[in-house]
Amino acid sequence: MVKIICLISLLKSSNDNSEQYNLINKHMSIAFISYLYTFIHTNFSMEKSSFSRRQFVSKLITAAGVSALAALPRQSMAAVNNEKDVTVQDVIDMFIHTVPSAPIKGTVDTIKAGNPSQKVNGIVTTMFPTIDVIKKTIALGANFIIAHEPTFYNHTDETNWLSNDAVYHYKLDLLNKHNIAVWRCHDYIHGHVPDGVLMGVLTALEWNKYYDAANPNVVTIKETSFEDIISYTKNKLEVAHVRIIGQLSQPCKRILIMPGASGGARQISAIQKTQPDLIIVGEVNEWETSEYIRDMQLMEGKTALMVLGHIVSEEAGMQWMMNWLNQQLPQIKTTHVPSHDAFNWA
Ligand SMILES: [Zn+2]
């Protein structure tokens, strides 16, 4: 124990040397602390029962100074507490803590089923918590679904209007019977910097290398025909069909990507601002962006349109979320269960 205090004092004394101090500030990570703990534990016969890893971490942080604590990646803080039960609220707080605009006023990211204080046994990420996704969650032994979109068929998950509805009750009973919690993560994943959904989609398309923080929704690729981009996108996102407006032979280089359903005004404003060869979206209202593109094409404007479908356009975002959770909470298994497009083609 004396030796530990010596080591801590050594760390603290490095505060006087700004270069060393900065280095500690910059590089002190959970992994480093874990390593240090394991090293001391094995080498200096620490009293196991009276000095837990968490106590060690807190003593070390106190000794090294509050600014060292601030230097830890914010999202990793919850990982420190990996000895206690992780609750639904812990997971939610851990992610929200990483979002610069948090707390988001009036957010739709609320708990739709289950209890915030329940212990998490396993997590499933998905686009929609469909009955199929809920059944797969049960089969996985997980009890917490993080879904990007609503559970009960409207943006705010208002349920009064469904109080006599058989579909609503079937889903709610299934969730309650198996103690499954559901949290919507929509505003916060989009509020993450970079936007988690956008990064997921860019990664799935292998266009993340073109990501530009100053202009996050625009990528500039090697000039390719619209036809080839269509095949490439279908292949990468594993979809059979996309809806398009534009000439197949048209060359495309500058691509505006807006997953989900941003709405006509936002899509059209972004086209005006960025002047892309192609805009790829999740969903359009058929009386808005698609009609704008049609008129634009008739004026010999250059922008083509590709509509992926809402789920297809954002599913990779929830895979991004799965990866994030598996990194930050390795003690809890997170699985991505795709909800897949609801439509078949006939
Ligand atoms: Zn979205």
Image (cartoon, helix red, strand yellow):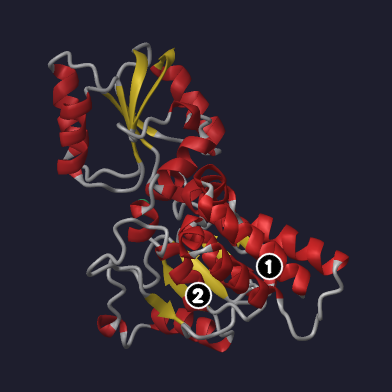
Q: Amino acid at mark 2?
A: Asp
Residue 209 vertical placement versus 238 (above, below): above
Residue 301 vs residue 79, the one in the foreground: 79
Q: Is residue 63 left or right of residue 165?
A: right
Q: Position of residue 26 (x, y in %)?
A: 53, 47
* Image-based side of 91 in relation to 84, left or right: left
Residue 66 versus residue 149: which sits nearer the camera?
A: 66
Q: Position of residue 194 (x, y in %)?
A: 40, 44
Identify the residue under disc 2: 90
- Residue at 79% of width from left, 85% of height from top? 49
Describe the element under mark 1 as helix, strand or loop. loop
CA neighbours of label 2 inside 10 A, class few (<14), some (14 to 19), many (20+): some
State the residue at coordinates (22%, 26%): 274
Nearer the N terminus, badge 2 or badge 1? 2
Q: Quadrant of the N terminus?
A: bottom right
Is 66 placed above or below 160 here? Answer: above
Is residue 179 or residue 171 the one in the foreground? 179
Which residue is identified by label 1? 331
The picture quadrant where one finds residue 103 is bottom left
Q: Judge the density around disc 1: few (<14), some (14-19), many (≥20) Cα neighbours within 10 Å.
A: some
